[in-house]
């Protein structure tokens, strides 16, 4: 039986819109990326349901392929992984001050701390839940998350005091780069310098952070100076290289059945607003996918360039993508209802990629793959290499996939 059978009941791909995650591609990407940072440990970032690929499935796959830690944003995401039986170290880095830190600590989840308020909340949780393992987060240049430089020394001192009280253990220091997809951007050097300074200040305060991490996918692939002891990789696992330097393998395929086919004559206007009119008699196919399912409406309309693959050929999306449906021009082909359209995939058979859709919509691949809606059926393939099942509600001990018990 398939290793992830519980999570992946077989579904008929043809019968409904289906998003298929290829875990073999995730495994191959994980190995490729690890080879680019041989001196650093690899944290697989599985936030946003593993970038839409299934957080637990991706976690188990990446751990089996060389990752040793996991990263998520919220405590809830970390607890969901624990409930699925994932025992590897998990870092959660984006939470409000009133998040359930006690539950996180009890579940052996590491917490990023970006401010004094967060530190106080984590320390308060630790008084009942036990020693909290934290990574202090320094803002190295996004003015987004992480402590501002001016507050860093104070944060380090407060964390050191909490360490001395036995409530906290500072396991890591983290930063993040704003422009790592453009290696020559001068802000990268600034970010590296700030990070090195942040680590020095932490050490001068008496902290001994074993994990020092600055790089996400782009920096991991382009700049060894950012690798330090650990790299945090999300996009790359899924075949997305923001730096455009390494060829990785897209892991997601979105398909949908053709619901109906109609013959229309020249002059027939199509869809809301009549933004497109049939120029020569043709067949129009209807797909049961729209912007509520993650097809960007901005890729359609009068200047829309969106296409899908039907019967081995690219077909243009015509008219505006609506909430639940999209219309494609099938030309002279008498495609039958029930035939499957590939909206995007790795591109092997000529289908568009998520990168194509991103270009058509004026966005990035990340937004396409994470934006697929909840009513699309999910399935995984390529998980035959996994030998330990992902279980709901049970913590697991060490196994061949790299899962280990909660410490
Ligand atoms: C999402 C995220 C990552 C992963 O970035 P990728 O470019 O997807 O590899 C790393 N660190 C932080 C803080 C993030 O939010």
Image (cartoon, helix red, strand yellow):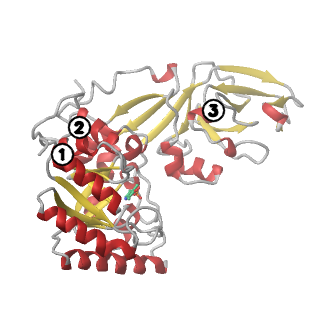
Residue bearing mark 1? 108
Measure how far apart labels 1 and 2 are at the Cα level.
Answer: 9 Å
Camera-side mark, 1 or 2: 1
Viewer-proximal residue among 284 and 134:
134
Asked if residue 388 is positioned above or below residue 228 in the image, the reply reads above
| Residue 219 appears left or right of 170 | right
Q: Position of residue 15 (x, y in %)?
A: 51, 19
Q: Which mark is drawn over residue 82? A: 2
Residue bearing mark 3? 290
Contact between labelled residues 2 and 1, with CB atoms less than 8 Å apart: yes
Q: Earlier in the sequence, mark 3 or mark 2?
A: 2
Residue beneath the point at 38% across and 55% down: 236
Callout 1 crowding tier (Cα within 10 Å): few <14, some 14–19, many ≥20: many
Callout 3 crowding tier (Cα within 10 Å): few <14, some 14–19, many ≥20: many
Contact between labelled residues 1 and 3, with CB atoms less than 8 Å apart: no
Q: Position of residue 60 (x, y in %)?
A: 24, 41
Q: Decide if residue 80 is in sight here.
A: yes
Q: Decide if residue 277 is in sight here.
A: no
Disc 1 Cβ-to-ligand 1 distance below 8 Å: no
Q: Secondary structure at mark 3?
A: loop
Q: Earlier in the sequence, mark 1 or mark 2?
A: 2
Measure how far apart labels 3 and 1 are at the Cα level.
Answer: 40 Å
| Residue 292 appears left or right of 107 | right
Asked if residue 406 is positioned above or below residue 149 in the image, the reply reads above
Q: Earlier in the sequence, mark 3 or mark 1?
A: 1
Q: Secondary structure at mark 1?
A: loop
């Amino acid at each position: 039986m398939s290793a992830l059978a519980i999570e992946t009941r077989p579904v008929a791909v043809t019968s409904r819109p289906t998003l298929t995650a290829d875990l073999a591609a995730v495994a191959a990407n994980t190995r490729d990326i690890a080879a680019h940072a041989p001196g650093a440990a690899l944290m697989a970032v599985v936030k946003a349901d593993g970038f839409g690929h299934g957080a637990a499935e991706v976690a188990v796959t990446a751990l089996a392929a060389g990752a040793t830690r996991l990263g998520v944003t919220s405590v809830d995401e970390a607890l969901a992984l624990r409930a699925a039986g994932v025992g590897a170290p998990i870092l959660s880095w984006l939470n409000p001050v009133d998040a359930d830190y006690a539950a996180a600590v009890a579940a052996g989840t590491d917490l990023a701390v970006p401010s004094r308020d967060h530190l106080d909340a984590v320390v308060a949780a630790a008084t009942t839940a036990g020693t909290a393992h934290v990574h202090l987060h320094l803002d190295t240049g996004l003015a987004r998350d992480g402590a501002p430089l001016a507050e860093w020394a104070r944060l380090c001192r407060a964390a050191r005091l909490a360490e001395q009280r036995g409530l906290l253990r500072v396991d890591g220091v983290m930063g993040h780069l704003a422009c790592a997809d453009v290696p020559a951007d001068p802000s990268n050097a600034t970010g590296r310098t700030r990070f090195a300074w942040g680590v020095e200040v932490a050490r001068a305060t008496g902290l001994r952070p074993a994990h020092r991490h600055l790089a996400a996918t782009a920096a991991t692939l382009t700049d060894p100076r950012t690798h330090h002891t650990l790299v945090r990789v999300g996009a790359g696992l899924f075949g997305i290289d923001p730096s455009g330097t390494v060829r990785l393998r897209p892991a997601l395929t979105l398909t949908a059945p053709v619901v109906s086919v109609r013959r229309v004559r020249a002059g027939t206007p199509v869809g809301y607003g009549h933004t497109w009119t049939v120029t020569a008699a043709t067949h129009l196919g209807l797909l049961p996918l729209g912007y509520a399912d993650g097809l960007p409406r901005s890729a359609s309309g009068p200047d829309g360039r969106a296409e899908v693959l039907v019967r081995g050929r690219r077909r243009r999306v015509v008219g505006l993508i609506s909430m639940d449906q999209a219309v494609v021009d099938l030309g002279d082909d008498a495609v039958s209802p029930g035939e499957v359209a590939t909206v995007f995939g790795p591109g092997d058979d000529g289908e568009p990629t998520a990168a194509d859709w991103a270009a058509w919509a004026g966005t990035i691949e990340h937004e396409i793959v994470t934006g697929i809606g909840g009513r699309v059926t999910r399935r995984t393939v390529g998980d035959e290499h996994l030998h330990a099942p992902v279980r709901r509600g049970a913590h697991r001990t060490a196994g061949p996939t790299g899962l280990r018990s909660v410490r």
